Image (spheres, rainbow, N blue to C red):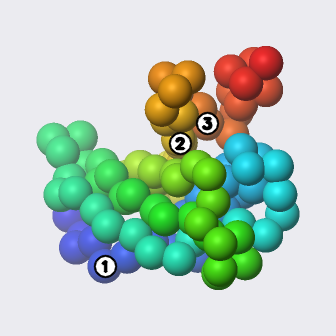
Amino acid sequence: MKKFEGLNKSEIKKAERLANVLNGSNDCKVTGCSWKSNDELGFIEVFCEICHNYNERADYDVTVEVMMDDRRRSYAHSVIGQLDKYITIDNYKERLA
């Protein structure tokens, strides 16, 4: 299995797209990240800090699950603390309704 050296551009875009949807803006950027080692299925959990236009901290942070065998299958999600809802780009409309 390959060694994880950081997020690909496409994975950063997935995180920023979900952050824009959750925060209701279009200027969210990934400004920092940290990760846990991979699990038995080959996923690495990457925690991304999100800021508005590299300045102001956003309301929601995003986690990217990176599948090391096939990086195209990586996906972004967020857990909103008070609502305790697991949100992805596919289910955000029904979860936030």
Q: Sequence-wise, which precedes: disc 2 or disc 1?
A: 1
- Do the numbered discs 3 and 2 sit on residues whose CB atoms are within 8 Å? yes
At label 3, counting other C-alpha atoms closer than 10 Å, the crowd grade (few under 14, some 14-19, many 20 or more) is: many
Q: CA distance from mark 1 to mark 3?
A: 24 Å
Residue sitting at x 73%, y 78%: 53
Can residue 69 be seen here?
A: no
Residue type, numbered disc 1: Glu
Where is 76 relative to 31, above or below? above
Left/right of residue 85 with respect to residue 1 in the rendered view: right
Left/right of residue 37 with respect to residue 28 in the rendered view: left
Which percent across, then down, holds residue 81? Answer: 48, 32
Which percent across, then down, holds residue 20? Answer: 75, 55
Q: How many marks?
A: 3
Q: CA distance from mark 3 to mark 2?
A: 5 Å
Residue sitting at x 58%, y 49%: 60
Q: Which residue is mark 1?
A: 5
Residue type, numbered disc 2: His
Q: Sequence-wise, which precedes: disc 3 or disc 2?
A: 2
Residue type, numbered disc 3: Thr
Q: Where does the C terminus fall, quadrant-wise?
A: top right
Which label is found at residue 77? 2
Which percent across, then down, holds residue 18? Answer: 68, 50
Which label is found at residue 88? 3
Task: Choose top left, top right, bottom left or bottom right for residue 69.
Answer: bottom left
At label 2, counting other C-alpha atoms closer than 10 Å, the crowd grade (few under 14, some 14-19, many 20 or more) is: many
